Amino acid sequence: MLVLAFVSPLCALSVALFSARVAHHLLLVLVAAPLLAVAFPARHGGFLAVAGAAFVVVMWGWHWPAAYAAAYGSSPTYWAMQGSLLVTAILFWRAVMAPQGHALRALMGLVAASGAMGLLGALLTLAPAPIYWPHASTTASFGLTPIEDQQLGGLLMWVPGMLPFAVAGAILARSRFRDLSGKEAA
């Protein structure tokens, strides 16, 4: 997934289109990070609130127009953005998936994180004007206006971006109910 995110044409396209940058970040935080969390699991989910808060703050922080523009215009800042998104997402997913973690807290963390991502996606989709000026002159060659590109990015974050949280929540809930029904049968 990391090779796909950073070596594929998607990475190059993310320079021109905000929506491609969103797709790139979704691959990082909703595919690569959970896979890395499975590969390197946490023992317990005791730090879920901190990890979840860090993930949401970093996600929202890099979507602040000035921070986004700084990452767009500077290689070190770009890599700081990518690294902080990936690291906080890995920590969040490790806490959610921790085998000794509390299932209800993990579900609440998933709901909170998906809500934060959905709200950010909705705000970007419904914004009356484009807010990411680095893409103001790069979208036309792809048949999009800057606001259409931003709306597409917001929709990606808002709708498909919330699906991995829902799937993880369903898996957690199913395993929790299976555990409860097994205890009652015993």
Image (cartoon, rainbow, N blue to C red):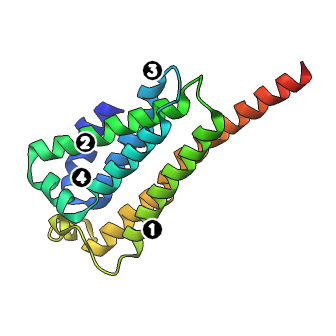
Q: Position of residue 46 (x, y in %)?
A: 51, 30
Mark 4 to mark 2 CA distance (whole Å): 12 Å
Mark 4 or mark 3: name the one nearer the start of the chain.
Answer: 4
Q: Residues within 10 Å of mark 1 (few under 14, many from 20)?
A: some
Mark 2 or mark 3: name the one nearer the start of the chain.
Answer: 3
Q: Residues within 10 Å of mark 4 (few under 14, many from 20)?
A: some
Task: Look at discs 4 and 3 and give the one toward the viewer.
Answer: 3
**Residue 120, picture quadrant:** bottom left
Horizontally, is 177 left or right of 110 in the view? right
Inspect the image, locate mark 3, and give the three-letter code of the amino acid beneath it: Ala
**Residue 167, picture quadrant:** top right
Inspect the image, locate mark 2, and give the three-letter code of the amino acid beneath it: Gln
From the image, tell me which residue sits under label 3: 39
From the image, tell me which residue sits under label 1: 122
Q: Which mark is residue 82?
A: 2
Identify which residue, 24 or 62, lies in the foreground: 62
Mark 1 or mark 2: name the one nearer the start of the chain.
Answer: 2
